[in-house]
Amino acid sequence: MRPAWSIIFFTTISGLGFGLAAWLVLGFVTLTNPAELVVVGLVVIALIGAGLVSSTFHLGHPERAWRALSQWRSSWLSREGVLAVLALAGLLAWGWYQTHVGPVPGWAGVALALVMAVTVYATSMIYASLRTVARWYHPLTPVCYLMFAAAGGLLAVLLVLAALGQAYGDALELSVLLALGSAWGIKIVWWQMAGAAGSGSSLATATGLTGLGAVRSLMPPHTSENYLQHEMGFVVARKHAARLRVIALLGGGVVPAVLVLLGRGSVPVLGLAVLVHLAGVFVERWLFFAEAKHVVSLYYGDQH
Amino acid sequence: MTSLPEPSAIKLGLVIDLDICVGCQACVVNCKEWNTSGYGAPLADADAYGAAPNGAWLNRVHAFEAGAGADAKVVHFPKSCLHCEAAPCVTVCPTGASFKRAEDGIVLVNEDWCIGCGLCAWSCPYGAREMDPAEGVMKKCTLCVDRIYNDNLPAEDQVPACVRTCPTNARHFGDLGDPQSDISRLVAERGGVDLMPEQDTKPVNKYLPPRPRRKADETPMSLLAMAEEATPAGFWKWVDKTLEKLG
């Protein structure tokens, strides 16, 4: 599948934003000072919002994007939109309550964190519900998205605490390392399992020409690339997949973990850790699209 | 509304005879022509006369080869929307632009609502949808909904453009929900099949497989071998013998 930059940026940035927001409303950062709350809140909203806005850049008609909120009964893309709006509204309400009334009750924080989690789940289901892409149509796909949002968010919590001058204990540091480790552990399992998953279709079933021997493409229906090949026949990454996976794992997991151990409350070091993590997840997300094969490529001579 | 309607009694669709299609591309051209000038936004091309032309087409004809050696069969394979009963392209649509008609099962796109996200094309295993390069909205086969119910056209033209134009009658249009319809009987007679049944899309359109042919002989005789085996007679017998004597 062709990796659209806007979509990769969206899932990476808003994933981190929802992760950070969830830990925030769960009380992992104590925000007593209204000025601090506004700044941190704006950063979170900027992360989520930048992702959402960028996701409209690949649309043919971005001005009609509001219509995408209407079909939540059947469409994961629509559910994702509705939930993201709910999550943002909830976050604003949470911030208003914190500054005007007092600490938000624990159950409300948990409920809001759940909305964040379900939003990330909905994002992942846009892809995981597509039967046509065997690699995505796998029960671990949503787990990967959720784990990366949780791990990235927790890593960002360290940076926020350091920036606010609040000390954090070894337990939180260890949690970040564990979260990063499990996210990448599941991703590696996903690379193996989902990568080996077949579509169950072949050119014989795609053409109904069964029982005649091997079927192969003899002549394409057109002489230059069409929309289907442009959108679903992306092959550039497969050649470098192994190398890119190492880069993603190093950037997204190993280097940030080392920086967390070295950082110990240092804003520049933790800031670098978050940036390198984002870059690594960006490569991981790019591979998520670029490595994925669509069954329609069978019609164009691809042997699955 | 992108939830799928209850399966309709009338299921309009196409039956494509792979035994007959000669791959002339007339259906492709007539489809493009009708859908450029008819329903919705024109079916656009980009850089049509340049180095890398591309455009939206709703019907494409592939050619496949099945089998090997002397028994290999070339099959011309027209492919367009199959108007699936469990159409994934409908349920994934976030705006309600992609829908399946409750009355006759035709899958359509409301081009005024489509945001051009492309998710429906991703969800279709058959590659039946293509984004319009000029309009930024998704295009697909309408089963010529603007012809089949159009009383301004003569009766023989009230069929999809691809069916009307096919010079070999490889394409048939009708109600696949009615087991007594001509095309339902054709499907039953010829053992019509679904494409990618394992994707659970329940396509309405059916494909008729090529009829079985006799096997080619195991070792076909070459023309040269035939000539060498033949015994000359008359004048050529005399030439043959004389030349042999000369050594």
Image (cartoon, coloured by chain):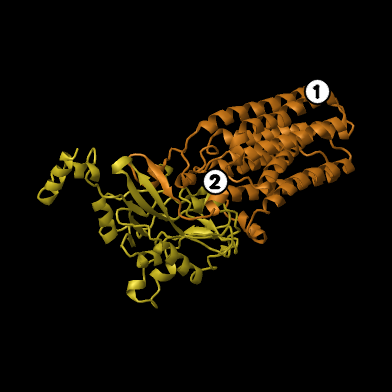
Chain colours: A orange, B yellow
Quadrant of residue B167 in the image?
A: bottom left
CA–CA distance in space, label 1 to label 2: 42 Å
Location of residue B30 in the rendering, given as x and y in whole percent from the top left corner: 43, 67
In the structure shown, which secondary structural element does the residue marked by tag 2 occupy?
loop
In the structure shown, which secondary structural element does the residue marked by tag 1 occupy?
helix
Residue B144 versus residue A52: which sits nearer the camera? B144
Q: Output the chain of dot 1.
A: A
Q: Is residue B223 left or right of residue A99?
A: left
Q: Output the chain of dot 2.
A: A
Location of residue B70 in the rendering, given as x and y in whole percent from the top left corner: 29, 42
Question: Which residue is pictured at 52% across the width and 68% down the height?
Answer: B40
Residue that lies at the very extreme toward the bottom in this rendered image: B152
Q: Which residue is mark 2?
A: A233
Location of residue A291 in the rendering, given as x and y in whole percent from the top left corner: 58, 38
Mark 1 or mark 2: name the one nearer the start of the chain.
2
Q: Which amino acid, by three-letter code, is at mark 1?
A: Leu
Q: Is residue B66 above or below residue B139?
A: above
- Kindly indicate whether the residue at mark 2 contacts the one at mark 1 (C-beta within 8 angstroms): no
Q: Which residue is mark 1?
A: A261
Q: Quadrant of the N terminus of chain A?
A: top right
Neighbor class of circle 2 (other Cα within 10 Å; few <14, some 14-19, many 20+) is many
Neighbor class of circle 1 (other Cα within 10 Å; few <14, some 14-19, many 20+) is some
Quadrant of residue A166 in the image?
A: top right
Location of residue B100 in the rendering, given as x and y in whole percent from the top left corner: 46, 58
Question: Which residue is pictured at 69% across the width and 31% down the height?
Answer: A247
Question: Is residue B97 visible in this depiction of the protein?
Answer: yes
Question: Which residue is pictured at 55% across the width and 54% down the height?
Answer: A227
Q: Is residue A26 left or right of residue B42?
A: right
Q: Is residue B54 left or right of residue A28?
A: left
